Image (cartoon, rainbow, N blue to C red):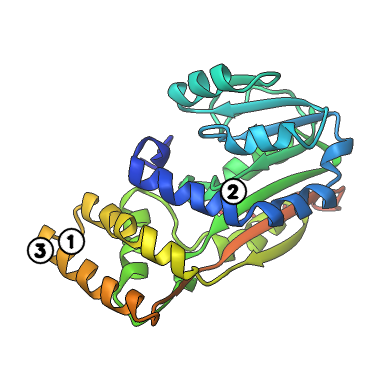
């Protein structure tokens, strides 16, 4: 499923993704200022999924925006909902655009699902103009998951991503990935502890994802939920994990590509 996998079509994944978008919004807005999104003339978003980031970008710039995805349903749904964007289906590992077309190339939860992330990155870099930016707005790292008491929710999410063909530790690899591609790179980490309200409202959905992946039985699911409810009601539950961003500037280097990361 790593080639075109889109968890957004599943209600369980959709809820979690919307939560992540909400709490990282201010973080993304700071990045938009850093890369001068407002001043860009042409922007490409790769792997736009349902178009949430695309819609957000539209509000921050008057640039010509192109958004591509491998999923035809994503393209159809986003094109119907969002005006003023060029949406189309394209192979994200072999883009149809010409070299050095865009001032900024953006992606979000993209490299986690790529079996060959370096190849994908080099395509993003190819269509980016010199002195432009290739930006990974968010890539999670489930190896940095924190929870107490330990009910193994993080371990199961790690296994879920692996089962779907993704790399659950991609976040901490972004610096090596971007630097290997010859990009002048800056990494940031965004993390938080889930607030009490979110724990109360969302923990069943998170465990339901694990159940739907077949990693636990119905009986095990009910037991986990009972344990979660007790410690959450007692206000003893702690959950958090890091989300990485990478801003890579396309500069001219003596050796354009240091080493193939893949």
Spatial distance from mark 3 to mark 1, Cα to Cα? 8 Å
User: Could you tell me residue 36's position as x and y percent?
Assistant: 86, 44
User: Could you tell me residue 110's position as x and y percent?
Assistant: 54, 45
Q: Which residue occupies the foreground of this view, 251 or 17? A: 17
Spatial distance from mark 1 to mark 2, Cα to Cα? 34 Å
For label 2, the SS is helix
Of badges 3 and 1, nearer the viewer stands 3
* Residue 72 position by quadrant: top left
Name above or below for residue 94 compared with residue 7. above
Of badges 3 and 2, nearer the viewer stands 3
Q: Name the residue under label 1.
A: 216
Of the residues under marks 1 and 2, which one precedes in the sequence? 2
User: Could you tell me residue 140's position as x and y percent?
Assistant: 52, 59
* Residue 221 position by quadrant: bottom left
Q: Name the residue under label 3.
A: 219
Spatial distance from mark 3 to mark 2, Cα to Cα? 42 Å
For label 1, the SS is loop
The residue depicted at 57 percent of the width and 32 percent of the height is 51
Name above or below for residue 215 compared with residue 137. below
Name above or below for residue 166 compared with residue 127. below
The label shown at residue 118 is 2
Density class for disc 2 (Cα within 10 Å; few <14, some 14-19, many ≥20) is many
The residue depicted at 54 percent of the width and 48 percent of the height is 109
Q: In this view, does 8 lie to the left or right of 189?
A: left
The residue depicted at 46 percent of the width and 46 percent of the height is 113
């Amino acid at each position: 499923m790593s080639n075109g996998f889109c968890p957004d079509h599943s209600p369980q994944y959709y809820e979690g993704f919307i939560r992540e978008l909400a709490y990282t919004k201010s973080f993304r807005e700071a990045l938009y200022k850093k890369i001068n999104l407002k001043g860009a003339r042409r922007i490409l978003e790769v792997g736009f999924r349902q178009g949430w980031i695309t819609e957000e970008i539209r509000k921050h710039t008057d640039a010509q925006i192109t958004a591509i995805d491998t999923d035809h349903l994503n393209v159809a749904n986003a094109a119907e909902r969002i005006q003023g964007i060029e949406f189309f289906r394209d192979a994200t590992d072999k883009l149809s655009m010409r070299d050095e077309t865009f001032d900024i190339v953006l992606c979000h939860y993209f490299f986690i699902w790529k079996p060959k992330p370096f190849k994908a990155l080099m395509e993003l870099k190819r269509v980016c103009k010199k002195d432009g930016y290739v930006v990974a707005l968010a890539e999670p790292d489930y190896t940095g998951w924190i929870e107490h008491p330990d009910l193994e929710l993080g371990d199961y999410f790690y296994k879920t991503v692996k089962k779907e063909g993704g790399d659950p530790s991609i976040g901490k690899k972004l610096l090596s990935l971007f630097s290997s591609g010859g990009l002048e790179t800056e990494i940031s980490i965004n993390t938080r502890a889930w607030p009490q309200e979110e724990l109360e409202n969302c923990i069943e959905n998170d465990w339901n994802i694990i159940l739907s992946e077949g990693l636990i039985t119905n009986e095990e699911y009910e037991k986990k939920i009972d344990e979660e409810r007790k410690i959450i009601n007692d206000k003893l539950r702690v959950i958090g994990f890091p989300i990485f961003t990478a801003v890579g500037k396309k500069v001219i280097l003596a050796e354009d590509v240091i080493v193939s990361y893949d």
